[in-house]
Image (cartoon, helix red, strand yellow):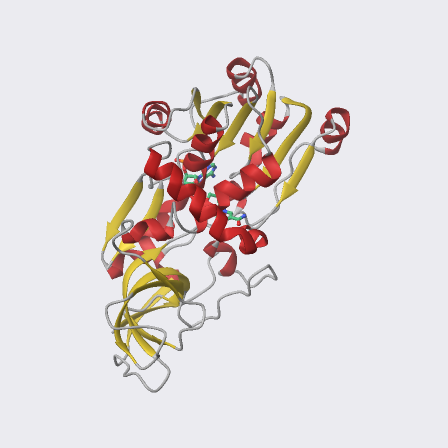
Amino acid sequence: NKVILLNKRPEGKPTLEDFKFVEEETPVVSEGQVLLKTRYVSVDPYLRGRMTDAKSYVPPFELNKPVQSAVVAEVLDSGNSSFNKGDFVTGLLDWKEYQLSDGRGLNRVDAEAADLSAYLGILGMTGLTAYFGLTEIGRPKEGETLVVSGAAGAVGSVVGQIGKIMGCKVIGIAGSDEKIEQLKSKFGFDAGINYKTTQDMTKAIADAAPDGVDVYFDNVGGEVSDGVLANINNFGRVPVCGAISTYNDTVVSQGPRLQPILVKNSVLMQGFIVSNYGAKFPEGIKQLTQWLQEGKLTYTETIVNGFDQIPQAFIGLFDGKNNGKMVVKI
Ligand code: NDP
């Protein structure tokens, strides 16, 4: 039974040396427990924050303890009346091939209704993040211009599609020409900007959004966001979902002071974490499922194969190796 531990806290971009593989006995269930076999592991940018020793909305990982993330697992054996052998569940679980759980925090998922990996993406945390961040904070109105950064990723690709469903003009920012092409051809975005080949982001946004930006869904922060915010309209809304461009920084980066822009244009800028909307998750899942069934929403995944590949898949997020949701299939 392989287990992945946090070996040391990353400095800058994570490396394989930050993780350690160990073997342990496959456990046996006792009364009240289930034995889980890991089937799909989600790797997410926010895990980088948990690898540092800083206070945040989730406690840091401990050194020499297993790393955890959202996992889809199969119940191999059950001593818990709420779960049967053969059930599939999601939960925040250790990076282990097999593990025990007392059932707390596990949710049963329907393997017939959707691909199992979808419960880590479009029907899981990233789909819900896109849905609630956009509808509750971005509040797009028909005819408005929506810009989303990290647009080809798990959250961003869903944000853009929901923006189209809500009648917006949608502009995506991502890191390769192939991703930009896919935003337009597969996800229905109106325009795309490759931030890696764009010298002047402020001008590129002005060109793509001649009426200005009404909603900016920010996944990346940094200079990309400086360029978008220079084009924000009166009463613009800015859901701040993430800032991946800064997650590996060893010194705090300095950008333009935003307050004058926010004041001058009466802009609402609000950070959030998806769990703020936990009470509404069933509603969000229902809406996302309906749009999927109606063909209004689609998704992509990058599926990496093999338990041993989990650390590399995680590191790959910071190189844009994924197209849509990055998951590891065990
Ligand atoms: P993604 O699927 O978007 O994967 C990360 C992507 O970020 C990469 O594919 C890469 O795409 C892009 N990226 C990496 N480095 C940089 C950089 N330096 N500058 C700009 N883009 C970069 O991940 P998620 O959809 O899971 O997460 C997207 C964002 O949302 C993250 O910031 C994450 O922390 C946040 N998040 C927040 C949640 C919340 O509750 N607030 C919940 C879930 C996610 P490219 O090729 O375009 O560079």
Q: Nearer the viewer, residue 22 or 110?
A: 110
Work out which quarter of the rendered image holds the C terminus and state it: bottom left
Q: Can residue 299 be seen in this view?
A: no
Rendered location of residue 68, percent (x, y): 41, 64
Question: Which of the four quarters of the rendered structure image does ligand 1 lie in?
Answer: top left
The front one of 175 and 199 is: 175
Name which residue lies at 52% across and 56% down. 49
Instruction: Reply above or below: 261 against 10.
Output: above
**Where is the N terminus found, in terms of image quarters?**
bottom left
Image-based side of 104 in relation to 310, left or right: right
Place of residue 173 in the rendered image (x, y in percent of width and height, measured from the top left): 46, 28
- Kindly tell me whether residue 188 is visible in this rendering: yes
The relative height of residue 182 versus residue 28 in the rendered view (above or below) is: above
- In the drawing, does residue 306 fall left or right of residue 214? left
Tell me the residue at 77%/29% (across/down): 263
| Side of 208 where 96 appears, left or right | left
The image position of residue 107, as x and y in percent, is: 40, 63
Callout count: 0
Left or right: 287 in relation to 263: left
User: Residue 233 is drawn in which quadrant?
Assistant: top right
Estimate the x, y position of residue 291 in percent, counting from the top left.
39, 37
**Residue at (69%, 35%) from the top-left corner?**
268
Answer above or below: position of 94 versus 15.
Answer: below
Q: Which residue is drawn at 39% across and 34% down?
A: 152
